[in-house]
Image (cartoon, rainbow, N blue to C red):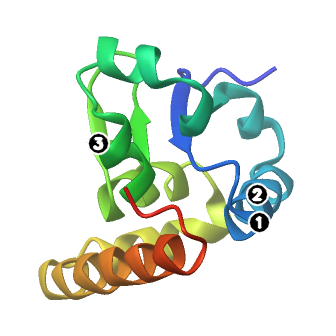
Amino acid sequence: MSDLPLLKVYYDAVCPGCRRDRARYERWAGGAAEAVEWIDVTDNAARLRERGVEPREALLSLHVEDHRGRIVEGIDAYILLMRRVPRLRPLAWLLDLPGVKALLERAYRRWVRRRLAREGRLP
Protein backbone atom coordinates (compact mmCIF):
# COMPACT_ATOMS: atom_id res chain seq x y z
CA MET A 1 0.00 0.00 0.00
CA SER A 2 1.25 3.47 -0.86
CA ASP A 3 1.78 6.17 1.76
CA LEU A 4 0.84 8.84 -0.77
CA PRO A 5 -2.34 10.84 -0.20
CA LEU A 6 -5.27 9.81 -2.37
CA LEU A 7 -5.87 11.52 -5.71
CA LYS A 8 -9.25 11.27 -7.42
CA VAL A 9 -8.96 11.36 -11.20
CA TYR A 10 -12.09 12.32 -13.13
CA TYR A 11 -11.51 10.97 -16.62
CA ASP A 12 -13.40 9.90 -19.75
CA ALA A 13 -13.58 6.11 -19.43
CA VAL A 14 -15.50 5.89 -22.72
CA CYS A 15 -12.38 7.07 -24.57
CA PRO A 16 -10.17 4.10 -25.59
CA GLY A 17 -7.03 6.27 -25.53
CA CYS A 18 -7.89 7.52 -22.04
CA ARG A 19 -8.31 3.94 -20.81
CA ARG A 20 -4.94 3.01 -22.35
CA ASP A 21 -3.33 6.04 -20.68
CA ARG A 22 -4.80 4.97 -17.35
CA ALA A 23 -3.47 1.42 -17.73
CA ARG A 24 -0.03 2.72 -18.70
CA TYR A 25 -0.02 5.09 -15.72
CA GLU A 26 -0.95 2.26 -13.36
CA ARG A 27 1.88 0.08 -14.73
CA TRP A 28 4.48 2.83 -14.46
CA ALA A 29 3.29 4.10 -11.08
CA GLY A 30 3.68 0.74 -9.35
CA GLY A 31 2.60 1.03 -5.71
CA ALA A 32 1.74 4.72 -6.15
CA ALA A 33 -1.17 3.63 -8.37
CA GLU A 34 -2.96 2.39 -5.24
CA ALA A 35 -3.33 6.01 -4.11
CA VAL A 36 -5.33 6.97 -7.21
CA GLU A 37 -9.09 6.55 -7.53
CA TRP A 38 -10.28 6.66 -11.16
CA ILE A 39 -13.79 8.07 -11.63
CA ASP A 40 -15.61 7.94 -14.97
CA VAL A 41 -17.03 11.38 -15.76
CA THR A 42 -19.76 9.90 -17.96
CA ASP A 43 -21.33 8.04 -15.03
CA ASN A 44 -20.79 10.54 -12.22
CA ALA A 45 -22.45 13.84 -13.15
CA ALA A 46 -23.97 14.36 -9.69
CA ARG A 47 -20.66 13.64 -7.95
CA LEU A 48 -18.89 16.10 -10.23
CA ARG A 49 -21.46 18.84 -9.56
CA GLU A 50 -21.08 18.25 -5.81
CA ARG A 51 -17.38 19.01 -6.27
CA GLY A 52 -18.14 22.16 -8.29
CA VAL A 53 -17.26 20.70 -11.68
CA GLU A 54 -19.71 20.76 -14.57
CA PRO A 55 -19.82 17.35 -16.31
CA ARG A 56 -19.29 19.06 -19.68
CA GLU A 57 -16.03 20.59 -18.43
CA ALA A 58 -14.93 17.26 -16.96
CA LEU A 59 -15.45 15.65 -20.36
CA LEU A 60 -13.41 18.38 -22.06
CA SER A 61 -10.45 18.26 -19.67
CA LEU A 62 -8.91 15.87 -17.16
CA HIS A 63 -9.69 16.87 -13.56
CA VAL A 64 -7.79 15.65 -10.49
CA GLU A 65 -8.85 16.21 -6.88
CA ASP A 66 -6.13 16.11 -4.25
CA HIS A 67 -6.54 14.88 -0.66
CA ARG A 68 -7.49 18.40 0.48
CA GLY A 69 -10.37 18.62 -2.00
CA ARG A 70 -8.56 21.02 -4.35
CA ILE A 71 -9.33 20.31 -8.00
CA VAL A 72 -6.87 20.99 -10.79
CA GLU A 73 -7.56 20.44 -14.46
CA GLY A 74 -5.94 20.16 -17.85
CA ILE A 75 -2.15 20.08 -18.03
CA ASP A 76 -1.91 20.86 -14.30
CA ALA A 77 -3.85 17.64 -13.61
CA TYR A 78 -1.41 15.65 -15.73
CA ILE A 79 1.53 17.27 -13.96
CA LEU A 80 0.09 16.35 -10.55
CA LEU A 81 -0.21 12.71 -11.61
CA MET A 82 3.20 12.59 -13.30
CA ARG A 83 5.02 13.94 -10.26
CA ARG A 84 4.14 10.72 -8.41
CA VAL A 85 5.93 8.50 -10.94
CA PRO A 86 9.74 8.67 -10.92
CA ARG A 87 10.12 8.05 -14.65
CA LEU A 88 7.58 10.81 -15.42
CA ARG A 89 8.92 13.49 -13.06
CA PRO A 90 11.29 15.01 -15.64
CA LEU A 91 8.39 15.27 -18.10
CA ALA A 92 6.21 16.87 -15.41
CA TRP A 93 8.95 19.44 -14.80
CA LEU A 94 9.12 20.20 -18.54
CA LEU A 95 5.34 20.49 -18.89
CA ASP A 96 5.24 22.91 -15.97
CA LEU A 97 7.45 25.47 -17.73
CA PRO A 98 5.30 28.56 -18.42
CA GLY A 99 5.61 28.70 -22.22
CA VAL A 100 5.40 24.95 -22.61
CA LYS A 101 2.36 24.66 -20.35
CA ALA A 102 0.42 27.36 -22.20
CA LEU A 103 1.17 25.84 -25.61
CA LEU A 104 0.28 22.32 -24.49
CA GLU A 105 -2.92 23.50 -22.80
CA ARG A 106 -4.18 24.99 -26.08
CA ALA A 107 -3.15 21.92 -28.09
CA TYR A 108 -4.71 19.58 -25.52
CA ARG A 109 -8.05 21.42 -25.59
CA ARG A 110 -8.15 21.36 -29.41
CA TRP A 111 -7.28 17.65 -29.48
CA VAL A 112 -10.01 16.76 -26.96
CA ARG A 113 -12.64 18.79 -28.81
CA ARG A 114 -11.73 17.12 -32.13
CA ARG A 115 -11.82 13.67 -30.53
CA LEU A 116 -15.22 14.26 -28.93
CA ALA A 117 -16.62 15.77 -32.15
CA ARG A 118 -15.36 12.79 -34.16
CA GLU A 119 -17.05 10.46 -31.65
CA GLY A 120 -20.29 12.48 -31.74
CA ARG A 121 -19.93 13.27 -28.02
CA LEU A 122 -18.97 16.96 -28.07
CA PRO A 123 -21.14 18.58 -25.38
Residue at the image position 79 percent from the left and 65 percent from the top:
20
Q: Is residue 64 above or below residue 59?
A: above
Amino acid beneath label 3: Val
Q: Is residue 11 visible?
A: yes
Out of 5 and 24, give the one closest to the viewer.
24
Residue at the image position 29 percent from the left and 42 percent from the top:
72
Q: In x, y percent, where is residue 54?
A: 28, 34
Amino acid beneath label 2: Arg
Q: In x, y percent, where is residue 63?
A: 40, 43
Helix, strand or loop under label 3: strand
Q: Are marks 1 and 2 in contact (CB under 8 Å)?
A: yes
Amino acid beneath label 1: Pro
Q: Which mark is residue 38?
A: none
Q: Is residue 31 above or below residue 15?
A: above
Name the residue beneath numbered marker 2.
19
Helix, strand or loop under label 1: helix
Q: Is residue 95 left or right of residue 20?
A: left
Spatial separation of the CA atoms under disc 1 and disc 2: 5 Å
Out of 77 and 5, give the one closest to the viewer.
77
Q: Is residue 39 left or right of residue 49?
A: right
Helix, strand or loop under label 2: helix
Spatial separation of the CA atoms under disc 2 and disc 3: 20 Å
Q: Is residue 25 left or right of residue 50?
A: right
> Which mark is nearer the camera, 2 or 3?
2
Q: Which mark is residue 16?
A: 1
Task: Please tell me in which quadrant of the rendered image residue 60 appears.
Answer: bottom left
For marks 3 and 1, the one nearer the N-term is 1
Name the residue beneath numbered marker 3.
72
Task: Please tell me in which quadrant of the rendered image residue 51 appears.
Answer: top left
